[in-house]
Image: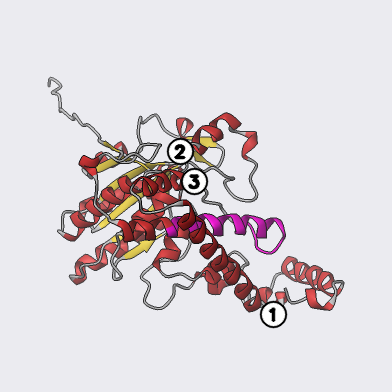
C-alpha cells in the first residue's frame, strides 16, 4: 500500500505589548486603567522585596533552602490577577507573589520555608494547592481539579504554573493529554526561565518552542514575553475566558529569566555567564512596568518611593510576626513521622538534642 501524507501545518503566535523601555503598543492595550495597573505593580514590588528578604534570611540561617523568583514577577502576578475568588490555582515552587495575591499571608510562606507543615495549609476560602517541589507532579492535580469542576457544573477554572524543566517529564504529557481529551477548564502558564537548574532549554528539547508541545494534543498554545505584564495578563485572561465557555485548556509559554540562583543551595556562576545575566537584567519586569506607569503619568518618583517604603514595612512586620510564631521545641519534628522511629532517625534526634543543649537558653527554641 502506498504511503499517504497527513498535512500537519501549524504556526504559533508571540505576544508582546510593552517593549523593554515600557513603550505601549496601543493596538494591543488591554485597558487595565490606573488603579488596577498600580495594584499589579505593588504586588510585583512586594514579591521582589520579600524575595530579597528571604534570600538574606536564608543566608543568616533563619529559614531553610528556598527558590528565589527575582525576574519572574510579571508572569506570576499577571496570571494570578485575572482569577476569580472561586477559581483554583496550582503553583509549582517559584510563585510566592501569586500566592500572596491569592491571600496567603507572608507569615505562612516563612513558616513553610522553616519546615512548619502549617505553612502548607491554604488560608480559609482560598482555592489553592500548596507549594509543590517535585517537578511536574502538580500538573495532573490541576487537571483533576478542573475536570471535577466541569463534572460538578462549577464555573471555576484552574491555573497551573510550571517551569521549562517540567516539559521534560512524563506527567507533563499525561496532564496535557487528559486536559485536552476531556476539555478541562484549565490553563497552563509555563514560566520558561531558560534553565532547569543547570540544564539549558537547548539541552532539554529539540523543539523550537515549548508551546508547540501543546499542539500535539490539539490544545491552543501561545508564546508571550513573560517579562511583559500586559502581555501575560491579556493571554491569561483570554485563556480563562475560553475555559469558562467550555472550550477547554490553553497552554501559555512565558519567556522570562531567573536572575538569581535556582535555589539558595545553587551556584549559577558554574553554568551560565555574567553577560547573560546582565543582558536579562536590562529586561527586568519591574523596571519595564514602572517605565510604562511613569509614561502614563500614573507613578512618579515620589509615589514609587512611597510604595517601596510601604511594601518594605509590610515585609519587615511579617517577618517579625512569623518569627514570633515559630517558637517551640525543634525535637518535635521527629515525633510525627514514624510510630517506631528507625535507629538512624533516633541518632539524628540525639545529635540535634545535644546541639540544642549546647546553645544559650534563648536560642534553643528558635
Marks 2/1: CA–CA distance: 44 Å
- Residue 291, quarter of picture: top left
- Residue 14, quarter of picture: top left
Q: Residue shown at 15%/59% (left/top)?
A: 245
CA neighbours of label 1 inside 10 A, class few (<14), some (14 to 19), many (20+): few
The residues colored magenta run 42-65
Q: Residue shown at 43%/59% (left/top)?
A: 42
In the visual, does 163 lie left or right of 84? right
Q: Earlier in the sequence, mark 3 or mark 2?
A: 3
What residue did someone put label 1 on?
Answer: 328
Residue 287: x and y in percent read 46, 45
Q: Earlier in the sequence, mark 2 or mark 1?
A: 2
The nearer-to-camera label among 3 and 2 is 2
* Helix, strand or loop status at disc 2: loop
Residue 104: x and y in percent read 46, 69
Q: Which mark is residue 283?
A: 2
What residue did someone put label 3 on?
Answer: 71
Q: Residue shown at 29%/66% (left/top)?
A: 87
Amino acid at each position: 500500500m502506498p504511503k499517504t501524507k497527513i498535512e500537519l501545518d501549524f504556526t504559533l503566535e508571540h505576544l508582546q505589548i510593552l517593549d523593554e523601555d515600557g513603550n505601549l503598543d496601543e493596538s494591543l492595550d488591554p485597558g487595565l486603567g490606573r488603579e488596577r495597573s498600580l495594584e499589579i505593580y505593588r504586588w510585583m514590588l512586594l514579591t521582589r522585596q520579600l524575595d530579597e528578604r528571604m534570600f538574606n534570611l536564608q543566608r543568616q540561617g533563619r529559614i531553610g533552602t528556598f527558590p528565589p523568583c527575582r525576574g519572574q514577577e510579571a508572569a506570576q502576578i499577571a496570571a494570578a490577577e485575572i482569577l476569580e475568588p472561586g477559581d483554583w490555582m496550582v503553583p509549582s515552587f517559584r510563585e510566592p507573589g501569586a500566592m500572596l495575591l491569592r491571600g496567603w499571608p507572608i507569615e505562612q510562606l516563612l513558616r513553610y520555608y522553616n519546615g512548619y507543615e502549617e505553612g502548607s495549609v491554604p488560608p480559609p476560602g482560598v482555592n489553592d494547592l500548596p507549594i509543590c517541589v517535585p517537578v511536574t507532579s502538580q500538573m495532573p492535580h490541576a487537571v483533576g481539579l478542573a475536570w471535577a469542576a466541569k463534572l460538578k457544573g462549577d464555573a471555576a477554572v484552574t491555573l497551573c504554573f510550571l517551569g521549562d524543566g517540567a516539559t521534560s517529564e512524563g506527567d507533563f504529557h499525561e496532564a496535557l493529554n487528559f486536559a485536552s481529551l476531556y476539555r478541562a477548564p484549565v490553563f497552563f502558564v509555563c514560566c520558561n526561565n531558560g534553565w532547569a537548574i543547570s540544564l539549558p532549554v537547548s539541552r532539554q528539547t529539540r523543539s523550537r518552542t515549548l508551546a508547540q508541545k501543546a499542539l500535539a494534543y490539539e490544545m491552543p498554545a501561545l508564546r508571550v514575553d513573560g517579562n511583559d505584564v500586559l502581555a501575560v495578563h491579556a493571554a491569561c485572561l483570554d485563556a480563562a475566558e475560553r475555559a469558562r465557555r467550555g472550550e477547554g485548556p490553553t497552554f501559555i509559554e512565558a519567556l522570562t529569566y531567573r536572575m538569581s540562583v535556582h535555589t539558595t543551595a545553587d551556584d549559577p556562576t558554574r553554568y551560565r555567564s555574567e553577560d547573560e545575566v546582565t543582558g536579562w537584567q536590562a529586561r527586568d519586569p519591574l523596571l519595564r512596568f514602572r517605565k510604562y506607569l511613569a509614561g502614563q503619568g500614573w507613578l512618579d518618583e515620589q509615589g514609587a518611593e512611597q510604595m517601596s517604603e510601604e511594601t518594605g514595612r509590610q515585609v519587615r512586620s511579617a517577618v517579625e510576626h512569623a518569627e514570633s510564631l515559630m517558637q517551640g521545641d525543634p525535637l518535635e519534628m521527629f515525633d510525627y513521622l514514624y510510630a517506631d522511629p528507625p535507629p538512624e532517625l533516633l541518632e539524628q534526634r540525639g545529635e540535634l538534642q545535644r546541639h540544642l543543649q549546647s546553645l544559650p537558653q534563648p536560642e534553643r527554641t528558635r
